[in-house]
Amino acid sequence: MVARAYTVAFEGIEARIVEVQCALAPGMPGFSIVGLPDKAVSEARERLRAALNAMSIALPSKKITVNLSPADLPKFGSHFDLPIALALLAAIEVIPPDEVEGTLSLGELSLDGSLVPVIGALPAAMTAAADNRALVCPRACGAEAAWVGAARVIAAPSLAAVIRHFTGQAPLDPAEPGEVSDNPAGRDLRDVKGQERAKRALEIAAAGRHHLMMVGSPGSGKSMLAARLPSILPPLTPAEALETSMVHSLAGLLDEGGISRTRPFREPHHTASMAAIVGGGRGAKPGEVSLAHNGVLFLDEFPEFPRPVLETLRQPIETGEVVVARANAHVRYPCRFMLVAAANPCKCGYLADATRACSRAPVCGEEYLGRVSGPLMDRFDLRIEVPPVSFTDLDLPDAGEGSAEIAARVAAARAVQAARFKGTPARVNADAEGELLEAVARPDAEGRDLLIRAAERFGLSARGYHRVLRVARTIADLGGSETVRKPHVAEALGYRLSVAALV
């Protein structure tokens, strides 16, 4: 007799169904797992032996073979413990085989038979719902998986509870979704004294999800501004929250099953490896660019990042997804993020400070910012200089306008874009391209004339030309204008500085 249970193997945010087949045969007693299992999957047999022994269930003196089908798909992770256990228990007729075959399960077994939480419950629940199956998972994963309303989620504390559920002795109630966690109000832009131009750039970037580069001497407020960016971003839509939570589920970052409506804000250190930034490593896990999906990726000390790491950002910025290719894995993760970078103008940081003049100017600045390639710098929609704040500005009272007022304008501009791009692949102005961009961002005659003259005079690339159009469209949205006019184009051009202008 061959008993079957079902689970999933993760390929990016996709969960592929895996059939767990268990066969008992006469011969020398043994327990083998085949089907390209990794070390964690192979060790499931020892955890299963101990868990069954703790429940006083004896394994038969037969040859036990567990096959994970499709056999050519690599299997990673400890979440295979529970489906292997269920297939084996069905094979020895402890639980009804037809009950097991109608479910999809995942979970790690501890030696006493309790179920340990695992990653990926949310995408597993979506796959279970699509395949018209119930999902059996550890109790700690139930609140997360239950957010997929189409799936019936059974969250059990132990393997013994699962057995009692399948045998009808003590049926388990379906799990309930966890509370939506909304982070408390963070830092307010009202705390920032001066820097009105930088605040305006931050507002435009937030409204259209434009990439922003800030260059300024140490202490000018670059990191302070970036830290307050989440306070003006609109909350995630339900669809965006589900997308983002699926990535965070695979990374094990969902807190007690709660799905947050707050946009992610990731700020990796400049010593982070390429696998940490773009994804990879064992099992091709998501990196920071994917964890920042639908949110912000803030890279402080931008030129200090290794050059290969920075160059890998070029494709994800353009496509909105990252492909992690390995010898035994080829997975895709979404990464539609807003890149915010901060850098000093030179190695010492005081290139533009007359009171602390850089002794190697201008070579110091050219060498330092020269670590960022031209093609990568060209992908920033807004590039601004953040000058030092004077002591007189620090003595000024709080600004009259804080994050709440700016966030209201950003939300209104985002609402306009949502209506504009309904039924198209684009969500915000930064996504518009080709004919769609020409249709929504075509400036009036004066604006087009200014843009053409600026493009010819300053040598804008085709990418730069289109990015100016997108920023101008966002500025028009913030101003409530249906048409992109000359002042909108002029302001957008003012934010597109070259590296030479910044140093």
Image (cartoon, helix red, strand yellow):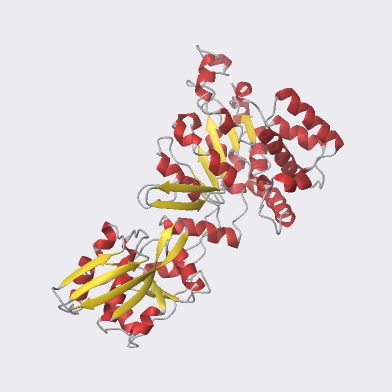
Residue at the (36%, 79%) spot, across then down:
100
Taking the image as shown, residue 177 lies to the left or right of residue 383, namely left
Residue 396 seen from this side: no
Image quarter of the C terminus: top right
Q: Is residue 99 above or below residue 14?
A: below
Task: Find residue 295 and report its horizontal and vertical position in percent.
Answer: 56, 49
Q: Nearer the viewer, residue 45 or 479?
A: 45
Q: Nearer the viewer, residue 193 or 356?
A: 356
Image quarter of the N terminus: bottom left
Q: Nearer the viewer, residue 350 or 21?
A: 21
Residue at the (50%, 46%) spot, across then down:
289
Q: Residue furthest top?
A: 359
Task: Find residue 11 and report its horizontal and vertical position in percent.
Answer: 43, 57
Taking the image as shown, residue 205 lies to the left or right of residue 308, namely right
Task: Find residue 369 and report its horizontal and vertical position in percent.
Answer: 53, 24
Residue 407 seen from this side: yes
Picture quadrant where residue 58 is located:
bottom left
Q: Residue furthest right?
A: 445
Q: Residue furthest bottom?
A: 169
Q: How many marks?
A: 0
Task: Find residue 246 and report its horizontal and vertical position in percent.
Answer: 49, 59
